[in-house]
Image (tube, coloured by chain):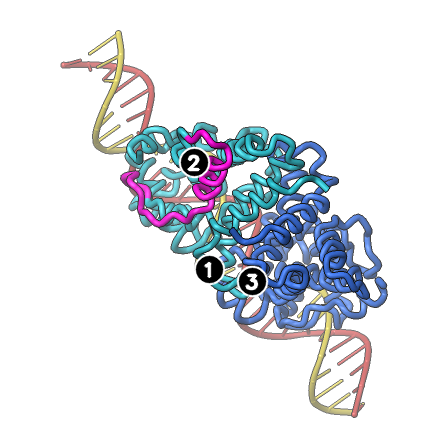
Chain colours: A cyan, B blue, C yellow, D red
Amino acid sequence: MQRLMQMNVQVSEPVYLKDPQGTDLGRRIIEHSVVLIDELGLEKFTFGKLAASLGTAESSIYRYFDNKHRLLIYLIGWYWSWREYKLVFDTANIGDAATKLERGVRSITEPVTDKGNFGYLDLRALYRIAVSESSKAYMTKEVDEEHKEGCFGGFKRLCDRLRDMVLEVSPKHPYPAALASQVVDGSMVQRFFAEHLPSLTDKGTKSRIPDNFVHLVFASVNTPKR
Amino acid sequence: MQRLMQMNVQVSEPVYLKDPQGTDLGRRIIEHSVVLIDELGLEKFTFGKLAASLGTAESSIYRYFDNKHRLLIYLIGWYWSWREYKLVFDTANIGDAATKLERGVRSITEPVTDKGNFGYLDLRALYRIAVSESSKAYMTKEVDEEHKEGCFGGFKRLCDRLRDMVLEVSPKHPYPAALASQVVDGSMVQRFFAEHLPSLTDKGTKSRIPDNFVHLVFASVNTPKR
DNA sequence: CCATTGTGATAGTATTACTATCTATTTAGA
DNA sequence: TCTAAATAGATAGTAATACTATCACAATGG
């Protein structure tokens, strides 16, 4: 399964200047930027530090990405694409719509505990980046233009799949898309809160995030519009 | 009511070096930073531009705030404190727990349409900042230390109040605090999506956000643990 | 009238976010 | 095999940013 994902997960939107998957330096840029952003946080991460870590010059990196914001969009896009493939796999060949929805919600809200099998890319580090930094990919003044360019297509495709699972169970649900995006985004935020602001969450929340979201989704799905 | 809020809303946590409410320049710093951050976005907002807008020197601003991140924490903290006071008012003297919860959810998830009556501070602009930038206040590597300092007290107090309203209706709810923080944070995220990534939401979501959250909360509250 | 407080102006440093240019090496194709 | 294109690395330079430090000045209050 991971081999298959390895073959399929890619970022199709042209957020890069030159495809980093296609060259050795490109792949090392991805590998090292994941490690460095995870370590330093996005604010303190710079192309200068990345270049130093790679033993190359800043100018080489600028040949792949316009700036660190585009690089972030690329990494987060990769992450959502990966989550989408995982979702497709985790819910394949399930006939019952409710079972499918439950599995889907669990698939999306589960933490990443495995380092993955993507060669150079550390999936756990990427997951931590997604939890802490993904909102910064779209919470900007450029969001409208970047959205037009298709920069957030990975996120949208994932949300759409979950929305469709909701609709399969409950075709008249009043706000299926909003519910889906709430689950996708909310599970990341809850993960962050559980880790860093535990006083905002309930005891044991961290390990129960998927259960909580399953409860929430089915409560919503089974409750008629008032 | 607004006069009372004017008297009560303040940021008690020492996120500032010198209380900006206490001086004329301080108040102008708040006023102009709200306008500028709203206009430029946090990334392009700088103390240099703020100083130019105020007709003063950068060094004067550094006497009030260590850096723009602390200023952001201050502004967002102010916003959450204001929402808390609004919540208290909107739910005062309601005996029935369910009615109180519904009013509370509506209070928290309602958009700000009024410019407010806070003299120098444009509440609508602050609301837009809160929608777009609030997550950047805590999604950083310094979050743990800043949380210990009490920088996010306003957010926590608001979530705690909503959690208590949930518990009043359903004392055995499995994850009342997580539900509360989901509503508080999620309503901002949904607002942003409706504005900038409408393909992620359902038709008419924008005007139905409070309804959707009321539905969600009551669905959750009325659904037993599985 | 003197000490404190608040403000403004200037100057300077290190870092960041780029842009431009030149050279060297590898690779693909004719 | 020769040539052209692609790739990478090195160097240099610019403008903006995020500060820090210092000095001078005015108002204010006891």
Residue occupied by mark 2: A87
**Residue B208 vs residue A10, the one in the foreground:** B208
Where, by quadrant of the figure, is residue B184 drawn? bottom right
Q: Closer to the N terminus: mark 3 or mark 2?
A: 2
Identify which amino acid the numbered label 2 is placed on: Leu
Q: CA distance from mark 3 to mark 2?
A: 28 Å
Q: Closer to the N terminus: mark 1 or mark 3?
A: 1
Q: Please state the extent of the stretch shown in magenta in the rendering.
A: A94-121
Q: CA distance from mark 1 to mark 3?
A: 10 Å
Please tell me the numbered disc located at residue A195.
Answer: 1
> Does B53 appear in magenta?
no
Above or below A69: residue B73 = below
**Residue B92: image location, x then y, percent:** 80, 65
**Residue B107 vs residue A216, the one in the foreground:** A216
Residue occupied by mark 3: A200
Q: How many residues crowd mark 3 within 10 Å: few (<14), some (14–19), many (20+)? A: many
Identify which amino acid the numbered label 1 is placed on: Glu
- Chain for mark 3? A
**Residue D8: image location, x then y, percent:** 29, 36
Marks 2 & 1 on one chain? yes
- The answer to whether residue A50 of the structure is visible from this angle is no
**Residue A63: image location, x then y, percent:** 40, 34
Where, by quadrant of the figure, is residue C5 drawn? bottom right
Q: Residue at x 34, y 43 (%)?
A: A57
Query: From the viewer's perspective, is A225 left or right of D22?
Result: right
Identify which amino acid the numbered label 3 is placed on: Leu
